[in-house]
């Protein structure tokens, strides 16, 4: 994945690695240099700065400690080394000096394991995106031993951050272009806590939807600059045109003093320890924080968020309700995400084989002969599941425990990956499949609550906290739905209650008017929320 030259130059600017600086006295590290997308322009700047400070080719050995580049792949290492050697020769270095500098500068090794002498003034680059599944088990175990930020299913770029930060001297800066998932998701928690405790997020540029690389990538990239030391203000820019805007924005963000470029925002205390970092713009963040200060999280406001049943073997547990070969007491009507169309529920006739009694205990096989015969016919398959290996005699359980009372409980159903929220009322007829989330409440009128969850307020919260999917689609998972702030039903004025209940499911203006009244938003806050939600939604006519 080759980084565009404009992006590489921007990162060097943001890291303070400029030709006007005495770069021969500084040290720069590129931890995975590949084809030299960062290393080559860094060397160009080093040579230009050296000329200004009287470091001529015959004195080039003074530059031995100015650059360190690490690369594990032999072909990339060799080609980049040859390119740098040729550049040094063109500069005027002797063949012996050029070779000696390349030998001093370049390290063929795994950055996460290589012995490197620091500290460095600048760490810059595009760390590799490698999922844990692609890393050999012994190597992954060694990485985990060395780096505490490898948490849950963390991508390989996470420990690259950790080691890069470790190698910074006081006041030094790390500048990476990298996937932005660690800023919000579960596996990024330890890295966020590390940065919040010992470092300062000085600059952040959202590169979603930009052509930051010379090939198409799925990951949502961002430019992140982190300085060793404390600080309060983070400068933020969003989705600049790489060719036309990024160079000027990077220079403006790197300049000392107050930001004067209108495309650059300054946000105070943008990081919050291991909590998700919200870097979507100052106005949007202020509106969200005001809602968080004024209202409780949805589950503290009289609601409960859950997810439907995962079985681990749908081919055994899910099928045509009428044809399931089990006793009536052992099956439930199952609603799927595909049953929610155009804001309405049209049951597709699927059913769930339910291995649990109403109290949550496993049903006895000898009490239900047809149920037992069905499960025994698939025993080999069922016992291969992880949940079965852990459960012993309970080998026939589903991954999630089934509480059949949920079937007859009125609930709101919400599918996960959508451009905007789809919220459908089930009056108490179906059990949800694991591709659906559900919200219940003993206090809220569910018709009113559905309006809230369709509103720009809900979109604001979900978009702020979720990690987006390809195409910009939002994740309506339980962990993000639980972030939504909500007034208590008793605190909603009568006229606002009526408006929430009456709002048509497809009338976005009516939905927002009713929701804003329920939250008692000012016109200014309402407009900010509306704009933020409009940017986050993905419609059929405007796919990102």
Image: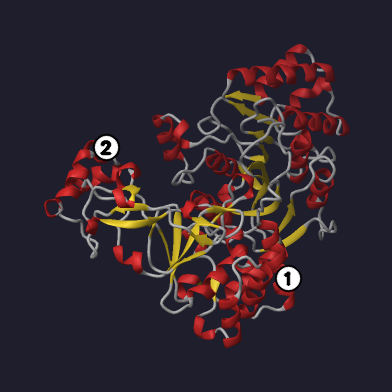
Residue 423: image x %, image y %? 53, 63
Instruction: Work out how far the residue at label 1 is from the one at label 2, CA to CA, in angstroms.
Output: 54 Å
Query: Could one spot residue 473 in this view of the protein?
Result: yes
Nearer to us in this view, 60 or 5: 5
Q: Residue at x 80, y 23 (%)?
A: 59
Query: Residue 263 at what x, y percent from top left?
Result: 81, 55
Which residue is the site of mark 1? Answer: 527
Residue at the outermost front position: 322
Foreground mark, 1 or 2, reads: 2
Residue 413: x, y in percent?
Answer: 47, 62
Q: Secondary structure at mark 2?
A: helix
Check disc 2 and report the residue beneath it: 381
Q: Residue at x 79, y 56 (%)?
A: 264
| Front residue (pair 450, 385) | 450
Label 2 Cα neighbours within 10 Å, binned few <14 / some 14-19 / many ≥20: some
Q: Does label 1 or label 2 sit earlier along the sequence?
A: 2
Q: Of residues 422 and 124, which is closer to you in this image?
A: 422
Q: From the viewer's perspective, is 7 left or right of 323? A: right
Quadrant assignment for the N terminus:
top right
């Amino acid at each position: 994945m080759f980084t565009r030259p404009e992006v590489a130059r921007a990162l060097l600017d943001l890291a303070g690695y400029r030709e006007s600086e005495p770069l021969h006295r500084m040290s720069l590290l590129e931890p995975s240099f590949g084809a030299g997308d960062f290393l080559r322009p860094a060397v160009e700047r080093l040579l230009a700065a050296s000329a200004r400070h009287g470091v001529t080719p015959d004195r080039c050995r003074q530059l031995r400690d100015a650059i360190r580049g690490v690369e594990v792949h032999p072909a990339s290492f060799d080609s980049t080394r040859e390119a740098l050697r040729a550049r040094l020769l063109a500069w005027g270095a002797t063949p012996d000096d050029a070779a000696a500098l390349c030998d001093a500068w370049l390290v063929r090794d795994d950055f996460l394991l290589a012995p490197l002498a620091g500290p460095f003034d600048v760490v810059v680059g595009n760390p590799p995106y490698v999922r844990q599944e692609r890393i050999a088990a012994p190597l992954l175990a060694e990485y985990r031993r060395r780096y505490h930020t490898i948490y849950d299913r963390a991508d390989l770029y996470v420990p690259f951050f950790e080691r890069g930060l470790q190698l910074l001297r006081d006041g030094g800066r790390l500048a990476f272009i990298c996937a932005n998932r660690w800023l919000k998701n579960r596996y990024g928690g330890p890295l966020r806590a590390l940065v919040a405790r010992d470092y300062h997020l000085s600059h952040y540029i959202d590169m979603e939807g930009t052509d930051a690389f010379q090939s198409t990538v799925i990951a949502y990239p961002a430019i992140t600059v982190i300085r060793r030391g404390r600080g309060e203000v983070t400068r933020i820019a969003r989705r600049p045109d790489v060719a036309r805007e990024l160079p000027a924005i990077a220079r403006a963000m790197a300049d000392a003093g107050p930001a004067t470029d209108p495309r650059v925002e300054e946000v105070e205390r943008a990081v919050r320890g291991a909590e998700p970092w919200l870097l979507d713009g100052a106005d949007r963040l202020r509106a969200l924080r005001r809602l968080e200060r004024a209202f409780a999280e949805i589950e503290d406001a009289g609601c409960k968020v859950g997810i439907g049943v995962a079985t681990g073997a749908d081919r055994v547990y899910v099928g045509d309700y009428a044809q399931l070969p089990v006793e009536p007491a052992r099956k439930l009507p199952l609603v799927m995400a595909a049953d929610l169309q155009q804001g309405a529920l049209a049951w597709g006739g699927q059913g769930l084989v339910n291995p649990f009694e109403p109290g949550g205990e496993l049903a006895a096989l000898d009490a239900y002969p047809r149920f037992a015969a069905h499960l025994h016919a698939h025993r080999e398959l069922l016992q291969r599941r992880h949940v079965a290996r852990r459960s012993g005699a309970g080998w026939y359980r589903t991954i999630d425990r089934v509480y059949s009372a949920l079937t007859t409980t009125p609930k709101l159903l919400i599918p996960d990956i959508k451009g905007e929220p789809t919220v459908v009322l089930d009056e108490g007829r179906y059990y949800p499949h694991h591709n659906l989330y559900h919200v219940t409440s003993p206090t809220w009128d569910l018709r009113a609550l559905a309006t809230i969850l369709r509103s720009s307020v809900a979109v604001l919260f979900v978009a702020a906290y979720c990690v987006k999917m390809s195409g910009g689609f939002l994740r309506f998972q339980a962990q993000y739905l639980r972030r939504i702030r909500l007034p208590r039903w008793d605190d909603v004025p009568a006229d606002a209650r009526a408006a929430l209940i009456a709002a048509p499911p497809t009338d976005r203006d009516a939905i927002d008017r009713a929701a804003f009244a329920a939250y008692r938003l000012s016109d200014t806050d309402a407009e900010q929320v509306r704009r933020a939600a409009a940017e986050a939604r993905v419609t059929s006519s405007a796919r990102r």
